[in-house]
């Protein structure tokens, strides 16, 4: 998964804005995790309404105040803001564990084209192997909340068999009775797998203006 940002810099949304600028640092933050690419903009009314929902969703899965062990989940904010000041203002109240691309990095736009983002907000869910699990999970997150993560993790494991647990287990976890349903719902088309890493179609304009 870190290969998506190979040669790039990701920044932590903490007070020091620590930069992840080596392959080792990127791997430590992104490998063996479900990765959410959050496309949004501070000037987009729908993004402003969705941001608190996504913040609560992420915190309840990754903050030890709510869970015994943080979920294997990472989030990268892919800003579509017009200015760096708007981006900074939007991120000010977001979780410190969020990552984001530098404002000047043109990968912000390239990712929108690659994953065919057509509206804001959008949340693209990627498996640990980098396949697209769902192209826009915003509505699902609003409806189901943190329960989404269990669905995604099981689907990713069904599709790839590569989701490693944070510690070694003698026996594999039993499969859910709903596994066949998840397999159908989250099946990744072969064409989509082959297209990974290549640019996809363009996007539509939103309140952020001139997407991609």
Image (cartoon, helix red, strand yellow):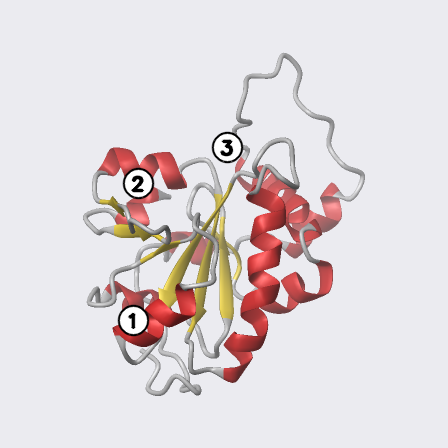
Q: Nearer the viewer, residue 115 or 183?
A: 115
Residue at the spot of label 1: 109
Work out whether residue 200 can be spotted.
no
Q: Are marks 1 and 2 in contact (CB under 8 Å)?
A: no
The picture places residue 155, in percent across and down from the top left corner, at 62, 45
Q: Nearer the viewer, residue 143 or 17?
A: 17
- Whether 51 is drawn above or below 74: the answer is below
Work out whether residue 88 can be spotted.
yes
- Alpha carbon of mark 3 to alpha carbon of mark 1: how far? 29 Å
Residue at the spot of label 3: 162
Residue at the spot of label 2: 26
The picture places residue 177, in percent across and down from the top left corner, at 80, 39
Mark 3 residue crowding within 10 angstroms, few (<14) / some (14–19) / many (20+) = few
- Alpha carbon of mark 1 to alpha carbon of mark 2: how far? 20 Å
Furthest-top residue in this view: 170
Q: Are marks 3 and 1 in contact (CB under 8 Å)?
A: no
Mark 1 residue crowding within 10 angstroms, few (<14) / some (14–19) / many (20+) = some
The quadrant in which the C terminus is found is bottom left
The quadrant in which the N terminus is found is top left
**Circle 3 SS class:** loop
């Amino acid at each position: 998964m870190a290969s998506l940002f190979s040669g790039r810099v990701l920044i932590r949304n903490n007070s020091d804005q620590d930069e992840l600028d080596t392959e080792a640092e990127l791997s430590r933050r992104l490998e063996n995790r479900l990765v959410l690419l959050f496309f949004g903009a501070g000037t987009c009314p729908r993004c402003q309404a969705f941001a608190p929902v996504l913040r609560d969703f992420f915190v309840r899965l990754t903050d030890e105040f709510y869970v015994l062990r943080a979920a294997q989940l990472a989030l990268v904010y892919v800003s579509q803001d017009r200015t760096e000041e708007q981006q900074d203002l939007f991120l000010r109240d977001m979780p410190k564990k969020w990552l984001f691309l530098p404002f000047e990095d043109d990968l912000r736009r390239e990712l929108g084209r690659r994953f065919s983002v057509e509206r804001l907000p959008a949340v693209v869910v990627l498996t640990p192997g980098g396949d697209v699990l769902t192209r826009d999970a915003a509505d699902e997150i609003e409806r189901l909340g943190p329960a989404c993560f269990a669905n995604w993790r099981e689907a990713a494991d069904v599709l790839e068999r590569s989701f490693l647990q944070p510690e070694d287990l003698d026996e594999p976890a039993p499969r859910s009775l709903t596994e066949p349903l998840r397999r159908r719902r989250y099946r990744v088309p072969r064409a989509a797998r082959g297209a990974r890493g290549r640019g996809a179609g363009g996007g539509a304009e939103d309140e952020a203006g001139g997407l991609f």
